[in-house]
Amino acid sequence: MDRSTVGFVVFVVSVFVGRAIANNAQQKLATEEKAVLLDSVSGLRIYSFGAMLALGIAASVRPKLGWLVVPVIAGMILISCVRVSRAALPRNYRRAYGFNCAICLAGIAAATAIVWW
């Protein structure tokens, strides 16, 4: 198994574990709290899709720009974490979502280290 495959597997596992934790916490929210959560991150979906599309096009046209993918994904995760932490949600959910973000960022860092170093 080559290094890029191992890095990808590490990233996917970290995202899966983080999402499982966040999903478990989300199931405990009331309907009104779920609406607050959706309102707090709904604007990010369009921007994150646009950023990933632009990065995909840029990396395919100029492969040397591929390194930008890692900081952009990390930035999008941090922005969503900040938005959720500022929303009027229970402390347990905010803590679980922050843990989800930390796991995803650790997975990105580990995958980057495996692939490029």
Image: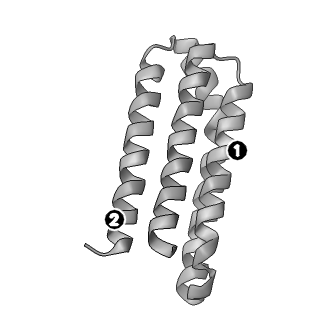
Please tell me in which quadrant of the rendered image residue 74 appears.
bottom right
- Picture coordinates of residue 28 (x, y %)? 45, 13
Q: Residue at (57%, 40%) from the top-left corner?
A: 102
Asked if 14 appears above or below 51 in the picture, the reply is above
Residue 103 disc label: none
Nearer to us: label 2 or label 1: 2
Q: Which amino acid does the dot numbered 1 rest on?
A: Ile
- First reached walking from the N terminus: tag 2 or tag 1: 2
Most foreground residue, 77 or 107: 107
* Circle 1 Cα neighbour tier, 10 Å, few/some/many (<14 / 14–19 / ≥20): some
Judged left or right of residue 34, residue 36 is right
- Picture coordinates of residue 90 (x, y %)? 62, 13
In this view, the residue farthest toward the front is: 117
- Picture coordinates of residue 65 (x, y %)? 63, 81
* Circle 2 Cα neighbour tier, 10 Å, few/some/many (<14 / 14–19 / ≥20): some
Q: Can residue 54 be seen in this view?
A: no
| Label 2 sits on residue | 6
Q: Which amino acid does the dot numbered 2 rest on?
A: Val
Judged left or right of residue 40, residue 110 is left
Asked if 80 appears above or below 68 in the picture, the reply is above
Most foreground residue, 4 or 21: 4
Q: Residue at (49%, 57%) from the top-left corner?
A: 110
- Under tag 2, what secondary structure? helix
Q: Residue at (33%, 69%) from the top-left corner?
A: 5
Residue 79 disc label: 1
Asked if 37 appears above or below 77 in the picture, the reply is above
- Measure how far apart labels 2 and 1 are at the Cα level: 27 Å
In this view, the residue farthest toward the left is: 1
Q: Is residue 105 visible?
A: yes
- Under tag 1, what secondary structure? helix
